[in-house]
Image: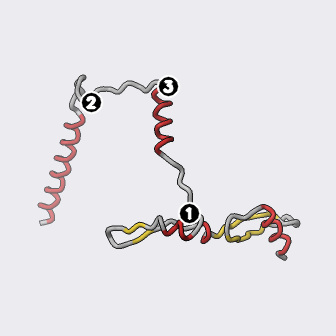
Amino acid sequence: MSHVVLKAAVAGLLLALGAGTAQAAKPITPGKSQSVKKPMTIEQKIALGQAMARSHKPRTAPKTMAQAAKTETFLAAGGAGAEVSDDLHNYFSVVRDAKGNLRMIETEGAPKPAQLAAEVSNEK
């Protein structure tokens, strides 16, 4: 029985390969949908770039929990998702102390250089 299954699998594989080569061997006829596209001019590229820049607005993360709540979405499968506000982010920074050792510091919110320097000097 396995001999019959093997023959059927080989026949199916050969049929699939034959169909792929027959599809690839069709000549391209000019005037149809397969016609060759002309390269874009500089003006067309600039116009396309400007149109893309207008349509792709940069996204900013919500700053507060109230703004984050507005981004909540519900999926058809029953799940939910929302963007996380900056209030809940912890930031890790690596700074070099006076002795030349690297220190990793965790802060709530984006750290300022003065805040990092103060935390390095307080650590022993």
> Where's residue 96, x and y in %?
81, 63
In the rendered structure, find residue 42 and report the number of the disc placed on it: 3
The crowding category of the residue bearing disc 3, from other C-alpha atoms within 10 Å (few below 14, some 14 to 19, many at least 20), is few
Q: Is residue 90 above or below residue 44?
A: below
Earlier sequence position, callout 1 versus callout 2: 2
What is the spatial separation of the Cα atoms under label 3 and label 1, in whole angstroms? Answer: 38 Å
Q: Which residue is mark 1?
A: 62
Distance CA(mark 3)–CA(mark 2): 24 Å
* Residue at the image position 38 percent from the left and 68 percent from the top: 74
Q: Which residue is mark 2?
A: 34
Q: Which x, y percent locates residue 119?
A: 80, 71
Helix, strand or loop at mark 2: loop
Q: Kindly indicate whether the residue at mark 1 contacts the one at mark 3 (C-beta within 8 angstroms).
A: no
**Image position of 13 (left or right of 62):** left
Q: Quadrant of the N terminus?
A: bottom left
Q: Is residue 38 left or right of residue 67?
A: left
Q: Nearer the viewer, mark 3 or mark 1?
A: 1
Q: Nearer the viewer, residue 88 or 24?
A: 88
Say few, some or many: other residues with alpha carbon within 10 Å of mark 2 (under 14 / 14 to 19 / 20 or more). few
Q: Amino acid at mark 3?
A: Ile
